[in-house]
Amino acid sequence: MKSVDERMDDLQRRAFRYFEIEVNPVNGLIRDKVGPADRDATNWPCSIAAVGFALASYPVAVTRGFMTREAAIERTLTTLRFFAGSVQGPEPDATGYRGFYYHFLDMQTGRRAWACELSTVDTALLIAGMLTCAHFFTDDAPDEAAIRTVADAMYRRVEWDKALDQAATLYMGWRPETGFLAPSWSGYNEALLLYILALGSPTHPVPVDSYRAWTRGYEWKRVYDIEYLYSAALFTHQFPHIWIDFRGVQDAFMREKGIDYFENSRRATYIQRQYAMTNPMGFKGYSANAWGLSASEGPGEETVLINGIERHFFGYVARGVPYGPDDGSLTPAAVAACLPFAPEIVLPAIECFVNDRRLHDANPYGFRATINPTYGEKSGPAGSWVSPWHFGISQGPVVLMIENHRSGLLWSLMRECPYIGQGLKRAGFHGRT
């Protein structure tokens, strides 16, 4: 039996392998997703969010001995130089515009893929990864100095203020063919990181009213006798916490409620577990140690009669608690990324997914995207559907949040980032900053 520390090391190492292998070494771009049948395919694009998670993971890999410092510097600088030199402009095949980047990029050319949107939140995740590297590679060596210079320039280039709507909230995206995309970011979700980065910009900051406008969409709810700031999918309670330690700091909303965002995510984690224990829709396999609904792949759009019940299944969708959508699909990686919030319930869940469900067996990258025991019953009572896909945006939070639980590395690095500090200050956070 492995110790807890050995288990954490194994989880991180397996998840990090995704960024070692699913990369174009010429430009540092990370493939969005991969399945066993297309490991060598060249037509699946890069996700800029996955690149952001990869960049933030390189310091963890150096610290844990998964990667040499020299290799991490080379990979980081290759990635940063690609984005610094990429095409910025209104052309429909550019890499980005006004410092923002398209959600998906061609793995070889780095140009816009699939006529996708210029994404504000995915740009924020990319920039956060760049800033992480800038605060880890702090030696005087020329390459480390170059990392700091280029990462800082990339952040300063983003014209956050150009993405505001009439209500002062940030648009989710933009397409050259149609303009800005509605709706804008309003109400609690992963965009907390986006707003803090936009508020902290020394070159193109958004006004303080932008943050206030965003929080006006907040929903405070009581679920299973637990009060919390509601957001349905588990990842929304995790992504900002990868980089920002919210323990002991509060904005105006959280001061009124008497908690902080870290405590809010802890409560959301417990609500996810309680939902699985209550299991209102009667899905197979839900329990105190098998829970976690988030954005994930699913069996696909299909309606099936299983054990006399008509079940509706989905493809990739943001599943959530307690109001759905829910089709019996659990996301083990999202559970692992809750480790800093509630290790007392997350560690037993990890053991369940690894030992009981055998989700690491013959599996190169840690957890697959999704498990759905209910859909598996379509072929017989002993079956359990397991997604054939791995996603970069699922593997990254496993590496990073486990490290925050083990050492607080990401939190420590980003406490030294003046832009994060300025963003928190302008958002009205007080306490330990």
Image (cartoon, helix red, strand yellow):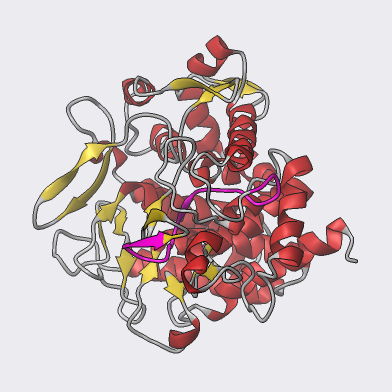
Query: Along the line of sight, which residue is nearer the eye, 161 or 212?
Result: 212
How many dots with numbers? Answer: 0
Q: Say above or below: 119 vs 169.
A: below
For the point 50% across and 84% down, the residue is 36
Residue farthest along the top direction in this orientation:
256
For the point 65% across and 33% down, the residue is 266
Residue farthest along the left direction in this orientation:
177
Residue 185, given in percent of the width and then of the height, sits at 31, 36
120 left or right of 366 in image: left
Q: Quadrant of residue 111?
A: bottom left
Query: Along the line of sight, which residue is nearer the eye, 330 or 364?
Result: 330
The magenta stretch is 287-305
Q: Is residue 320 visible?
A: yes
Q: Quadrant of residue 11?
A: bottom right
Residue 205, given in percent of the width and then of the height, sits at 34, 34
Q: Is residue 55 visible?
A: no
For the point 49% across and 16% down, the residue is 253
Q: Quadrant of residue 5?
A: bottom right
Residue 63, given in percent of the width and then of the height, sits at 75, 62
127 left or right of 416 in image: left
Q: Is residue 288 magenta?
A: yes
Q: Is residue 191 magenta?
A: no
Query: Along the line of sight, which residue is nearer the eye, 230 or 375?
Result: 375
Q: Main SS type for the magenta part?
A: loop
Which quarter of the rendered picture does the N terminus lie within?
bottom right
206 left or right of 268 in image: left
Residue farthest along the bottom direction in this orientation:
40
Which quarter of the rendered picture does the C terminus lie within?
top right
Residue 175, given in percent of the width and then of the height, sits at 16, 55
For the point 12% across and 48% down, the residue is 179
Query: Along the line of sight, which residue is nearer the eye, 370 or 328?
Result: 328
